[in-house]
Every structure is written in C-alpha cells, then in structure tokens.
Image: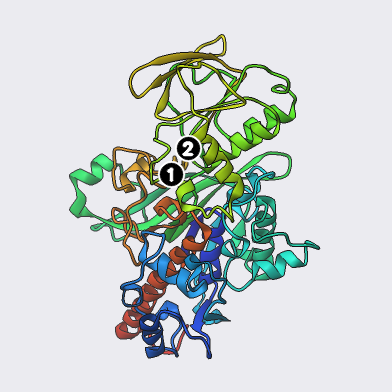
Amino acid sequence: MFPAQIIGNGPSGICLSYMLSGYRPYLSSEAIHPNAILHSKLEEARHLSIVDQDLEYLSEGLEGRSSNPVAVLFDTLLHPDADFGYDSPSILHWKLEQHHSIPHLVLGKGPPGGAWHNMEGSMLTISFGNWMELPGLKFKDWISSKRRNLKGDRVMPEEIARYYKHYVKVMGLQKNFRENTYITSVSRLYRDQGDNGSQDRDISAKHLQNQKSKFIKRNWEIRGYQRVAGGSHVPFCLFAENVALATGTLDSPAHLEVEGEEFPFVFHSMPEFGAAINSGKLCGRVDPVLIVGSGLTAADAVLCAYNNNIPVIHVFRRRVTDPSLIFKQLPKKLYPEYHKVYHMMCTQSYSADSDHLSDYTSFPEHRVLSFKSDMKCILQSVSGLKKIFKLSAAVILIGSHPNLSFLKEQGCYLGRNSSQPISCKGNPVEIDAYTYECVKEANLFALGPLVGDNFVRFLKGGALGVTRCLVTRQKKKQHLFVQRGGGDGVA
C-alpha cells in the first residue's frame, strides 16, 4: 500500500510527484522579494523549507489571479511581480532531501504531460513559456537547446508536452509514473469496529448510512486496467492512504443540450474541427461554419476557419462589452491574434436590416435553439427573434468537464454545488484553502483545474499545499509511534 496515489499525469500530477519525491524549496541566500511584508515573513524562518512553514501566515494579504491563496503565494515566490510584466527570477532554490520523500504512484492515460499531448498543434499557448515551466528546470534553457531562434515568449503546445515528458525523466521521477492506465473506480474501504480481523471491505452507501457509528474509514481502493502491447487490458487494484485528483477538466466537452446536436456535422473539439479542415471537407464550401463560444478555444476556431477562407457565423451569449470576457484580460501587444478576433466580434455583428453575412459575422447575445438534419440551425436572439442558417459544419466550444466517473456520483458531491457536474469555473471541487483536501471527503485531495486553477503557473500551489499536509500528518504519525514505544531504533 502506498501513502499516496496521484490520478492524472499532467503538470499538476508531475509537480506533486516532484515535491513528494523530496524536492524542497528554500529562500535563496541573496534573494529579496519585492513585497517587503512577505520578505520579512520569509526571513523569520529562512532555515526552513517553504513546505515546513505556515502557508496561511505567508499567504495572508497577498492578491493574484487565483482564488486559492497558496496558489497566489507560490506563484509570487516563483515569478515575483509577473502580473506587472516583469520576468524576475524566482527567489527560491531547490534541494533534494530524499529522506523526506513520500512513496507514491502517478497514474495517467498517456505519457507525462497529460492533455498537452492532445492539443491542437497550430496554436500558440495563451501563457508565456516561463509561466508553463515546473520547478527546477527553466523552460527557456530547455527550449533554447531545441530551437535555434526564439521569436517571442509564447510557444506551441507540442513543445510544452515534450518539456513535461523530459522533466519527468531529468528529475528522476520516472519510477513513480505508470502510463496507459485507466481508472474505473476509487472507493473508500471501511472496517467494522467490532471486527478483530484486518479485513477491509467495501460497504454500500445505504448500509453505511444506517450504521455509520459501527464502521471506521480505512484506506482507498483504486481499480482500473493498463493497456499493454497488443492492445490487451491488464486489470489492477491498488490501495492508498491518500488520493490526489489531478485529472484536469478537458475530458468531456460541454454540450448545448439542444435538438440535433448529435448530427455528424456538429463538432465539440478543436481536433475534430481541424481534422475536418485537413481532410478538405470544408474547403470551397459556400455555407458558413457555425462556431459557438466566447472563450479562447472558440477564438482559435475562428482564426482556424478564417485562415482557411471558410466563412464563419460566431454565436455567443454574452454582450461584447461584458467585462468578464477573457479578451479584456489580455494585453493587445502580447496577444494580437486574439484581439483581432475580439475586434471582429465587436465590429462585424449581424444586422437584421442588411441580412448580409460576410466572411465573419458575430451574433452576440444569441443562442442555438436546434440543428436540423438538412444541416440548418435555428438561432434565437435575446429579444426572441429567430433566424435559420444553412451550415457546412458547427463547432461547439463552450468549455469541458472532467471525467470523474470512477468516483461515486461522478464526483459531483465534491463540488460547491453537489447537484451540478464539476467544472473549472462554474463548480470547482470544494477544498480546504491551505491543504487542498476535499471538504466533503477526508484523505482525498484535488488540485489544478479541478479547483479552478486553469493556468499552469497557479496549479503548482496545489502541489505545495498537498505536500505540506501529507508531511505534517506523517510527522504526527511518527511522533505517536515514538510515544507508544515504537522508538527503539528499529525501522
């Protein structure tokens, strides 16, 4: 049995494995943080690693683009004043202290890097390359050995994927990683308090509710299978004291839940849309492509269609002046292509007077009512006006949900709203702000997009919070062991 199992091998899972392997961050000897109050706090315990310090105390008063205080803290230690446009060096240095390692496994469907291996390769990442890096290996150093000329700070997703895969290797983490693994169930085992035997068993929810006082919670049982050469499946069953969910949220694209959405001309991902373009199916078509959504993935689809001379109908529910639109948060100089889309959204909107569609036409404050088998769709404005258009394809890009089918209730019970599926923005997993432990399930942790941290620069805070919690509990166990007479020098 392992003290910890990590489900998901993207950047969240990789960073957590790095810290559980014994890598510890310390304040660099000559470092001075621009935040004088924070620097004063760090000086108080300079001899201690950040993992062994009071994260709530250090986080107090800090502000940033994450709602999780430890994420903001760790980000400002790794990238001081990043939100002000500075590329300041980290004030931390890392030491490998193997005696502090906590045995664990990282289970992932593909190679280390998670969903980054499946992203559309033609688009630049939204974040700068150095914001995508993990502790201990500068992205710029790695990419400069791979590329001859670096134009700008933004990079391709496939470069990020290769960096994460290399990171696991160079940091010596490979022994913790298991690829091609698919989880089918994660459940709690309980022990009957009156049972003197050591047999744990799976108790039904109803039976547990009726006789809750009779049972004590034990360990987690993780079941699944691993795909091996030849395509066969090898089942496995693992046990762990703690489980960390680091699955990301890109598994299941969100649907509009409207009539006709299942027709084959309706896509729900960029790879599907890209494949249709590359196959030549959409080239030379007079009918427009319908793109639904107002986020960056929808903007990527608009650019993709526009660059391939495919006319676009762009439908989204918000007003173009909505302050929560992501485009409002992106500096024009750094993200010119997204501001080009936003400019078109604002200036090339549909007018009932002209009834004319250009190469790009936006439909703010509209929604799709239905799709028809003859490749037509019905749109409705906020005022109730309906319009029918003939399409060559439709692409629905309105977000995604994680696949937590291996948990009871699909994991919904872990969210802030237990009646809704887990999502990064609308319904993240409810966690303790400093340990990342699920509020509704002890010894189950969540980090990354599952708790609202969609950017790599912030998900590293989750790894710090979880590591701090597990290390603290391990020390308490060792202390109890010594108190009970186990400290006779025998390991």
The crowd level at tag 1 (other Cα within 10 Å; few <14, some 14-19, many 20+) is: some
Q: Position of residue 21 (x, y in %)?
A: 55, 72
Dot placed on the residue nearer the N-terminal end, 1 or 2: 2
Residue reaching furthest to the top: 374
Tell me the SS state at disc 1.
loop
Q: Position of residue 472 (x, y in %)?
A: 37, 75
Q: Which residue is mark 2?
A: 294
Q: Picture coordinates of residue 471 (x, y %)?
A: 41, 74
Q: Amino acid at mark 2?
A: Ser
Amino acid at pointer 1: Leu
Image-quadrant location for residue 405: top left
- Tell me: residue 275, above or below residue 479: above
Q: Of residues 331 and 201, which is closer to you in this image?
A: 331
Give residue 108's mark.
none
Measured as percent of width and height from the top left, residue 465 is found at 40, 68
| Residue 225 appears anywhere in the view | no
Is there a contact, CB below 8 Å, between mark 1 and mark 2? yes
**Horizontal arrangement in the rendering, residue 197 relative to residue 303 (left or right):** left
Neighbour class for label 2 at 10 Å: few (<14), some, many (≥20)?
Answer: many
Residue 296 drawn above or below residue 133: above
Q: Nearer the viewer, residue 226 or 193?
A: 226
- Tell which of 351 and 19 is nearer to you: 351
Residue hosting label 1:
325
Q: CA distance from mark 1 to mark 2?
A: 7 Å
Tell me the SS state at disc 2.
Answer: loop
Q: Which scheme is used to colour this image of the protein?
A: rainbow
Placement of 307 over or under 130, stated as above or below: above
The residue drawn where x is 56% and y is 69% is 18
Q: At x 35% / y 80%, what residue is drawn? A: 481
